[in-house]
Amino acid sequence: MQVQQAITAKLTSTFSPIECIIENESHMHNVAKGSETHFKVICVSDAFEGLLPVKRHQAVYSCLSEELDGPVHALSLHLFTPAQWAKNSRSFESPQCMGGSKK
């Protein structure tokens, strides 16, 4: 769980979120058991106030550049201000893997 812990620490340190949920979804993909390559991130922070979604994503990508250059293959990002989260908090189901290199 080293990668998930690093993601959590970096997002917490950078964005001071009021809610930060990091889910390792690697088991849903064609990767080795115990992998940390696919993550869903739900992050609620005042730091996202006034930023368009693309700018929020860029800020997270910048924060996690080391992980994205290495072990992380995919991030599903759900980024909200506290006001947006209060209006819109719901379940964010990830789609099933289409198999990638599975035969």
Image (spheres, rainbow, N blue to C red):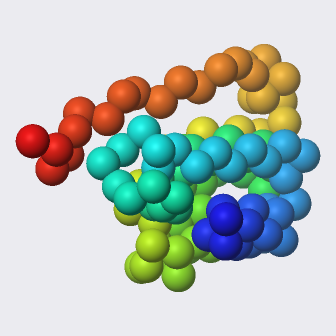
> What count of labels does the image hold?
0
Q: Quadrant of residue 16?
A: bottom right
Could you say which is closer to the camera, residue 98 or residue 74?
98
Residue 92 x %, y %: 59, 25
What residue is drawn where x is 78% and y is 28%? 85
Lateral position of residue 32 relative to residue 27, left or right? left
User: On screen, 85 above or below 88?
Assistant: below
User: On screen, 96 above or below 41?
Assistant: above
Could you say which is closer to the camera, residue 88 or residue 73?
73
Could you say which is closer to the camera, residue 51 or residue 81?
81
Lateral position of residue 59 relative to residue 72, left or right? right
| Res 91 seen here | yes
Residue 7 x %, y %: 67, 66
Lateral position of residue 99 relative to residue 94, left or right? left
Q: If the image is split into quadrants, where does the N terminus sit?
A: bottom right
What residue is drawn where x is 42% and y is 79%? 69
Q: Quadrant of residue 99?
A: top left
| Res 55 seen here | no
Residue 53 x %, y %: 54, 44
Q: If the image is split into quadrants, where does the C terminus sit?
A: top left
User: On screen, 21 above or below 31?
Assistant: above
What residue is drawn where x is 78% and y is 18%? 87
Residue 67 x %, y %: 52, 75
What residue is drawn where x is 47% and y is 44%? 27
* Residue furthest left as drawn: 103
